[in-house]
Image (cartoon, rainbow, N blue to C red):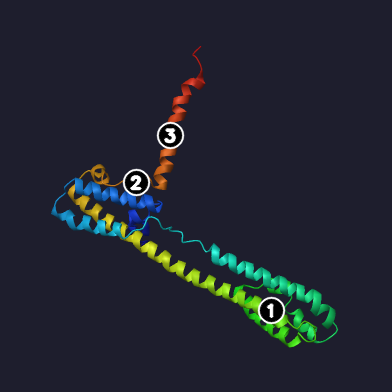
């Protein structure tokens, strides 16, 4: 026997698709409506819990997570500079001076196109090995500052990578916090709704304490209704005068 659909148990208020300012506003509407109705002692702790949840909710944050563009942009810039340096060094120094020597095969393993195809961790690992080659061969390449220049670019790349990882971890934590504050409001509103259903027989009365007009589904329904009404209004005019 198949069990009940899990959607039966979803918290209605957690599934509302609203921007954070609108989500907070609809919760404040419920709190205000509940207090103005003077519903009695049974509702006092429920409304207090809702107020606490609202106070812990920051509508100025973004549920989707703060942008990682800063960290990502710095990493891509450092990566691009490093790869360009690798390509130029191969073209201007390694190939002309070492192509007939066995060590040239070691450099070929770390060509620009090969490094470019690697993912983030592998790029750092492979680049570090290439860095060692630069230091070992800078005299043969007649490029005495090669090791130092490569070191500087590699360190910038590694630092940008670490910054990006740190930002990603911080943003993940922030998203969890944001989810928690929305859940707090949703739980408080569900409990309030449950008590309203025990108090009032009419669903219309229960739902009068909630404002879902800013929810995405509500906006879509309103648009469909408006279009349908427009078609009905336009129909007589399109039909033209009767014969």
Asked which secondary structure carries label 1, the reply is helix
Q: Quadrant of the N terminus?
A: bottom left
Asked which secondary structure carries label 2, the reply is loop
Whichever of callouts 1 and 3 sits on the residue coming sooner in the sequence is: 1
Q: Is residue 39 left or right of residue 190?
A: left
Q: Nearer the viewer, mark 2 or mark 1?
A: 1
Q: Quadrant of residue 92?
A: bottom right
Residue 96 is situated, as x and y percent measured from the top left of the image, at 84, 78
Q: Residue furthest front?
A: 145
Asked which secondary structure carries label 3, the reply is helix
Can residue 229 be seen by looking at this rendering? Answer: yes
Residue 137 is situated, as x and y percent measured from the top left of the image, at 76, 86
- Above or below for 159 versus 181: below
Q: Residue furthest right?
A: 100
In front: 179, or 163? 163
Q: Quadrant of residue 77?
A: bottom right
Which label sits on residue 150?
1
For the point 83% across and 86% down, the residue is 101
Dots 1 and 3: beta carbons under 8 Å? no
Distance between the alpha carbons at the discs numbered 3 and 2:
18 Å
Residue behind mark 3: 226
Mark 3: few/some/many CA within 10 Å (<14, 14-19, 20+): few
- Above or below for 125 versus 30: below
For the point 67% across and 83% down, the residue is 129
Whichever of callouts 3 and 2 sits on the residue coming sooner in the sequence is: 2
Residue behind mark 2: 212
Distance between the alpha carbons at the discs numbered 2 and 1:
59 Å
Can residue 5 be seen by looking at this rendering? Answer: no
């Amino acid at each position: 026997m198949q069990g009940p659909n899990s959607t039966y148990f979803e918290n209605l208020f957690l599934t509302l698709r609203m921007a954070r300012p609108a989500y907070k506003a609809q919760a404040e509407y419920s709190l205000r409506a509940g207090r103005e109705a003077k519903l009695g002692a049974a509702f006092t702790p429920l409304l207090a819990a809702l107020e606490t949840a609202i106070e812990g909710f920051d509508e100025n944050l973004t549920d989707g997570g703060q942008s990682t563009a800063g960290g990502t942009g710095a990493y891509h810039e450092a990566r691009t500079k490093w790869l360009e340096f690798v390509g130029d060094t191969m073209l201007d120094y390694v190939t002309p001076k070492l192509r007939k020597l066995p060590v040239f095969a070691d450099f070929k393993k770390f060509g620009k196109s090969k490094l470019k195809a690697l993912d983030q961790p592998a790029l750092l690992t492979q680049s570090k090995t290439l860095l060692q080659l630069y230091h070992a061969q800078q005299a043969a390449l007649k490029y005495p500052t090669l090791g130092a220049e490569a070191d500087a670019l590699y360190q910038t790349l590694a630092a940008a990578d670490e910054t990006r990882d740190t930002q990603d971890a911080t943003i993940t934590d922030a998203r969890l916090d944001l989810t928690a504050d929305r859940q707090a409001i949703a739980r408080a509103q569900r409990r309030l709704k449950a008590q309203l259903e025990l108090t009032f027989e009419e669903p219309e009365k229960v739902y009068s304490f909630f404002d879902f007009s800013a929810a995405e589904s509500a906006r879509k329904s309103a648009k469909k209704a408006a279009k349908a009404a427009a078609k009905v209004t336009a129909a007589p005019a399109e039909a033209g005068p009767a014969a």
